Amino acid sequence: MSDELFDSVDALLAAVSTGLPVPAERKRLRLAAGLTPAQIAAALRVNSALVAQWEDGSAVPGPDVTPAYIRLLEGLAARFPAPEEPAEDHLAPGVPAPGQQTSVEPTAAVGPVGGQSAVAGAQQVMLDQNPDGSLVMGAAAPCVRCGQPSVYRAQGRPMHLGGFCRPAISTAAAPASAARDFEPEPVAAAPALAAQAKPAPASPEPAAAPLSRPTPSTAAAPARTAQRPASTRATGPAAATAPAAGRWGPVVALDAALDGGWVLDVPGFPAPAGAKLGDWFAWLGTGLPLRVERAHPQGRGGDGAVCLTAAALKQLGLPAALPSTDKALNALRAKLAKAAAAVGMEVSENVGPVFRAFRRAGSAGGPKTSLQVTVAPWLGQGDARQQAVSALAAPLATALDGARDGATFARRYRAFTADLGVAPGATTASTAMLLLDAVRPRVEWVKDEATGEWSSHLREGALPSGHRCVPVAAGARHPLTRELLGQGRAVCEEEDYKWWARELTADEAGRRFAVAVDVCASYLSVTDSLPLPIGELEHVERPAWGKGKTAGLWLCDFTTVEVDELLPHPATFHGRPPTGPGWYATPTVAYMATTYGFDPATITEAYLSTHTAPLLKEWTGRIRAAYKRVYADLGLVDGQGPEEFLAVYAVHKEVGTDAVRADALTLGGLYKNIYKGGIGKWSDSARHLDDEQWLEKVASSWSYRPEIRFHIIAAARIAAHRRMRKTLQLTGRAPFAVNVDSYLYTTHAPSPLELLPVKDDGSPVPGALRLGIAPGSHKHESSIPLTAVVEAMERREHPSRLTHQYATDGTMIETSTAADTDSTHEQQEGET
């Protein structure tokens, strides 16, 4: 028994007799050197939260790290000696002067520790203890001796033990105060680390010289929680060294200088302590201020990212190219895993251009953490799976010269997350789903007041998981659809217009050109307020129409409804009149009823949603704002006149050496693919999966709801038809061919200007064809000599196939240039 007691006493003495300066002096030295807690933590292989706790007196360094910490502080003390002790009349109000009696009955005075000079009159107190000998701890409150927060109690009152009391300080401001104001706040320690850092009673340490900072408040410090602190704006001279993105940033690019030092693209960001792979993993695990902030109070944030450049790869001893053989790839992963394990971290099972480095909760070395690692030179390499995981990262990292550049990746990554509020996913389609869940979370956490336990529940209006398909709207790949088609029964076929064309009228044949105009972001023009079927689809006989306020699918017969002959039929994707009853989404039925007089009372059955809401409102707002921002960088903004818009659009892809324009062009393309891929995701066919896997992994997901896609496609097609119809009524002009969102009109000149209906004052007519970059407006895609169009139609080819072969002035372009256009019409928005 005595041996155990002696061991306990020895451990206690080892913990308190550190030879370290008082906590306030530790912080003064760090601030004087311009170091952050993260930088010291990286050098000592600990979490930055521990460094902050050593400096505020709530923890002491362990015996394994104390010698190194002492060496660091001694070196800093030699370079940055303490200023002179202030006079007593400068002491903070309410803080006792050295030797002044306090309200707590003192015990025996103690002498200097570790060779340091003691403060005159410093007295030791006996802290309250629990029956098991552990110290009584409570919420942080002002110590009755120094006024600084303490979690310990003496006779029930907040009290520090000896050297943990802060020194008396001067109210005079000094330059170091600015450094304190802008240093990054420490990351809250994980529970496992907090337990490890539980402070032990310490013998009194001498007071250090005063810190050059404002007098501390005597108000109780709030308890530290898991919530991230709010970022503060830096001002003054120290702002140059503060992280540009505030408290948290989404990504940092790590590069290496010629002299072997590290270069980071975020000012003031801590760098790895050394050039070895182990130093890099230790740096990743120190609690770097990398994170994508949550976009919704009930949502979740995202992991931050670190991007390695070619020079950083070389310095870390990693290959310049991703190994192409399984043996070499396994060896690379083993090398990374070994270095990570040394600091309690791990790497994801599949190492490639994009992988993860993480530490599990409770692992040695620090708190739970997770970061995405992107290796810029490896992007575009590896097998099909590795390239699929990094499909979205590759264009983000492609610089003007075509090389994969880490700094370019980080710059665009930051713009991407600032625009959308979510980090890029593996693909544009998966990113669209991540964005929807970020801005409109499906799950919320609820606390049971009786038990105190938290549980997750679907939020009101959230899309439930599980197989939700109904036979008439199960999607092209689903067995239910194949079964109905095999029986000769109708299913929902709401799609974009596909390959519709008609014969030219005599007036149209007398013109010289066919001008193709393309709708800008057609889906974004309808998804903002579109009511969508969120709830279950329930079968209803003889349904009440209710003016189309309920989203759903309706069995309608439009065969006898008269429509405009010069326009494609509004209810069918092929543009020809239907031959019998069919299933249509609410937007189609509503348009046929209000515009062409269809009687909803003739509807015999429907599948109606139990809950209808504008599901994509927040999602659309994010993408739409991002879309408009990047095009503004390219000179395309709302309100431009037709001639100005055409002139700017004709050269908007000519970026030259302008990085801002290059970034905008890249991000604009990604944002387009995100909303298009997101719409297609609702009816994902996932061709890489067999039927059984597809049913298990795709059809049972909350993100597989074909009826949602049917409503969006129907709304976009109806909006296009409404614009075509109004333009026809105002100008007598109608498209003679339509494919997806590209419309071909005949014109006298190779320009769409003569097609535009305008008011008396020259302004465009709302709801008709108009030029502009805003969603729902049109851009000039191509001008084709009408003779070429007629020849193609005589060969029974659709004339829209010619649009990528001719420029906007009507001249033919080279085949190589044509192949480099955005995409052929077979791959436009409706194709999923």
Image (cartoon, rainbow, N blue to C red):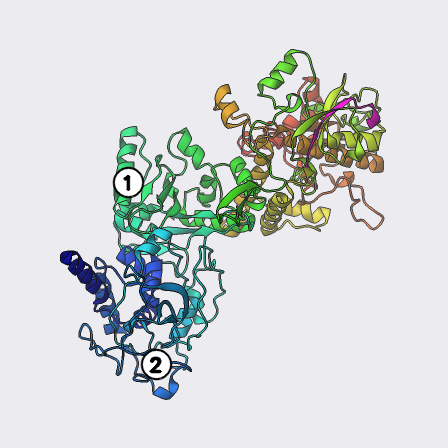
All told, the count of numbered labels is 2
Q: Amino acid at mark 1?
A: Ala
Residue holding disc 1: 337
Q: Is residue 267 above or below residue 809?
A: below
The x and y percentages for residue 35 are: 33, 65
Disc nearer the start of the sequence (1/2): 2
- Using the image, tell me which numbered label, if any, was put on residue 493: none
For the N terminus, give its image quadrant.
Answer: bottom left
The x and y percentages for residue 725 are: 80, 33
The x and y percentages for residue 337 are: 28, 40
The x and y percentages for residue 54 are: 31, 64
Residue 608 lies in magenta, yes or no? yes
Query: Distance from label 1 to label 2 (Cα)?
Result: 55 Å
Of marks 1 and 2, the one in the foreground: 2
Q: Amino acid at mark 2?
A: Thr
- Side of 189 where 697 appears, left or right: right
Residue 255 lies in magenta, yes or no? no
User: Which residue is drawn at the image coordinates 41% and 55% (left, top)?
Assistant: 289
Disc 2: CA contacts within 10 A as few (<14), some (14-19) or many (>=20): some
Foreground residue among 27 and 626: 27
Q: Is residue 402 above or below residue 740?
A: below
Residue holding disc 2: 102
Disc 1: CA contacts within 10 A as few (<14), some (14-19) or many (>=20): some
Q: Which residues are magenta?
A: 599-611
User: Which residue is drawn at the image coordinates 62% and 18% (left, top)?
Assistant: 481
Q: Quadrant of residue 440?
A: top right
The answer to whether residue 76 of the structure is visible from this angle is yes
